[in-house]
């Protein structure tokens, strides 16, 4: 009976402690004080029912009473240091370690991607590529302690402009471990435990460094949307912010770079923005970048086209890099169908025989592109682009 009761009290204490942490995170002094006092009270009760640990619980209760008394100072300095952890029972500790191991293997099996993307695979975005390369180089080089490279960089812009590609290239060029994390999918899959995934993620990243952590759709974690924001996403965000603050950073030699991406930067709140002091606008490609992206996506084929004219048309149609890739694929298909009549009939042949035949190709022509243009529509409007530009002007840099 006694053991049961202390179990209930302990889980109540843990819950209250979490509520205290949350109140502290939100700078809610009154609630934090109330929760600290409740923690003390629960610990005193625990001392009564768990004689074996009585002394330790009473000491902890006193500490929580001190926390309640000094709540104002604690909240003020909470960005520098965390309140002392209550020592856990051994069984409790083992359970948490087991749990962490479970999440770490989830991270290792699901969030690590092999990246073979190189800087040359990205057309345009020269300044941005340079900045990312510099950040990586500075992180890796030996340097005075006062020189601290960016640990978090935010990439924002319309869909399909190369944000994921840039993050992959960072990892590919360094041969770094690349963690590709979609905030919304971690939230929906691991709802209540998503903050544990984030802790495990950073722990694995430190183990396997150099590491690039790419957090896509970071806007899913924002608190600005008010009622949409769930408790789980708030907790996931607060763990992420703690990691970005570098509390857990053991040694500054670690290269764990966090890149975050969003299509809706205006949804992000102060808490996120303040951690990503570098915010980089990834715009739609201009004419020169468009030409480069077309060349990248038609590699190995000859271009018998008026590239300037095509590129101008693409810019006018507000094509993103993704649209350009699709455009090129359409144009290539048009060419293939043109010179390989009745291609589908070869499907009757056995695979080994097919392998000995060669696909016919010819240079791509303006006509191939003309046809392709009809199929590709940008989802963007000029006024949406203006919105990105305005935000970039105000908050970017
Ligand atoms: N600058 C670029 N150079 C070469 N290819 C590009 C470029 N931008 C986009 N692409 C092509 O478009 C595809 C999609 O790009 P990417 O996934 O990086 O876009 P994104 O900005 O992450 O989009 P979203 O916001 O929708 O996630 C890439 O796989 C690539 O083929
Ligand atoms: Mg992307």
Image (cartoon, rainbow, N blue to C red):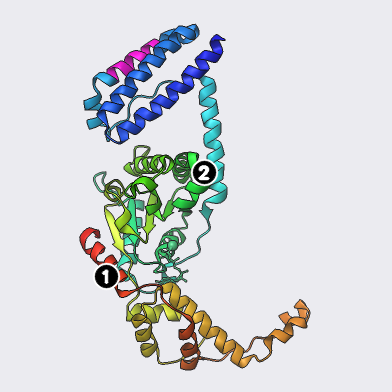
Instruction: Give coordinates of residue 129: x percent, y percent.
Output: 34, 66
Q: Where in the image, quadrant-wise, is ligand 2 located?
A: bottom left
Please tell me in which quadrant of the rendered image residue 46 appears. Answer: top left
Q: Can residue 66 be found in the magenta stretch? A: yes
Circle 2: element type = loop
Front residue of this view, candidates 355 and 154:
154
Instruction: Give coordinates of residue 11: x percent, y percent.
Output: 48, 22
Q: Quadrant of the N terminus?
A: top right
Left or right position of 383 against 111? left
Residue under pointer 1: 386
Circle 1: element type = helix
Please tell me in which quadrant of the rendered image residue 4 appears. Answer: top right
Any atom of ligand 2 within 8 Å of the CB at mark 2? no
Task: Using the rendered image of the protein, determine whether residue 327 is visible from the camera's viewpoint.
Answer: yes
Front residue of this view, candidates 358 and 214:
214
Residue under pointer 2: 190
The answer to whether residue 287 is above or below residue 106 is below
Which residue is at 30% across, 36% downward?
26
Which residue is at 34% across, 37% downward?
247
The chief SS type of the magenta part is helix
Q: Which mark is residue 109?
A: none
Disc 1 to disc 2, C-alpha distance: 36 Å
Please tell me in which quadrant of the rendered image residue 67 appears. Answer: top left
Q: Quadrant of the C terminus?
A: bottom left
């Amino acid at each position: 009976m006694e053991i049961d009761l202390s179990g209930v009290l302990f889980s109540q204490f843990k819950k209250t402690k979490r509520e205290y942490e949350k109140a502290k995170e939100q700078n809610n002094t009154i609630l934090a004080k109330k929760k600290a006092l409740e923690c003390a009270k629960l610990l005193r009760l625990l001392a009564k029912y768990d004689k074996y640990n009585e002394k330790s619980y009473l000491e902890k209760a006193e500490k929580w009473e001190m926390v309640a008394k000094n709540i104002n100072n604690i909240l003020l300095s909470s960005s520098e240091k965390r309140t002392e952890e209550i020592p856990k029972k051994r069984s409790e500790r083992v359970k948490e370690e087991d749990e962490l191991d479970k999440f770490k293997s989830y991270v290792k099996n699901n969030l690590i991607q092999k990246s073979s993307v190189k800087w040359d695979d990205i057309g345009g975005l020269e300044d941005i590529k340079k900045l990312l390369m510099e950040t990586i180089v500075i992180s890796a080089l030996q340097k005075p302690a006062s020189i601290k490279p960016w640990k978090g960089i935010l990439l924002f812009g319309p869909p399909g402009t190369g944000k994921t590609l840039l993050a992959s290239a960072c990892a590919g060029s360094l041969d770094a471990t690349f963690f590709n994390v979609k905030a919304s999918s971690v939230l929906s899959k691991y709802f209540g435990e998503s903050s544990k995934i984030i802790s495990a993620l950073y722990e694995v990243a430190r183990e396997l460094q150099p590491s690039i952590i790419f957090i896509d759709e970071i806007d899913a974690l924002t608190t600005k949307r008010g009622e949409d924001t769930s408790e789980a996403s708030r907790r996931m965000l607060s763990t992420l912010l703690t990691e970005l603050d570098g509390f857990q950073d053991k040694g500054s030699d670690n290269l764990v770079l966090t890149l975050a991406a969003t299509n809706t930067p205006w949804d992000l709140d102060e808490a996120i923005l303040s951690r990503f002091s570098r915010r980089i606008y990834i715009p739609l490609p201009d004419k020169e970048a468009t030409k480069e992206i077309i060349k990248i996506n038609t590699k190995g084929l000859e271009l018998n086209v008026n590239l300037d004219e095509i590129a101008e048309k693409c810019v006018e149609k507000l094509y993103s890099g993704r649209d350009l890739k699709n455009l090129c694929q359409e144009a290539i298909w048009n060419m293939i169908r043109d010179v390989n009549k009745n291609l589908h009939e070869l499907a009757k042949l056995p695979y080994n025989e097919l392998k000995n035949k060669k696909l016919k190709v010819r240079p791509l022509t303006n006509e191939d592109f003309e046809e392709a243009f009809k199929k590709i529509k940008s989802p963007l409007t000029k006024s949406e682009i203006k919105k990105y530009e305005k935000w970039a002007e105000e908050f970017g840099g």
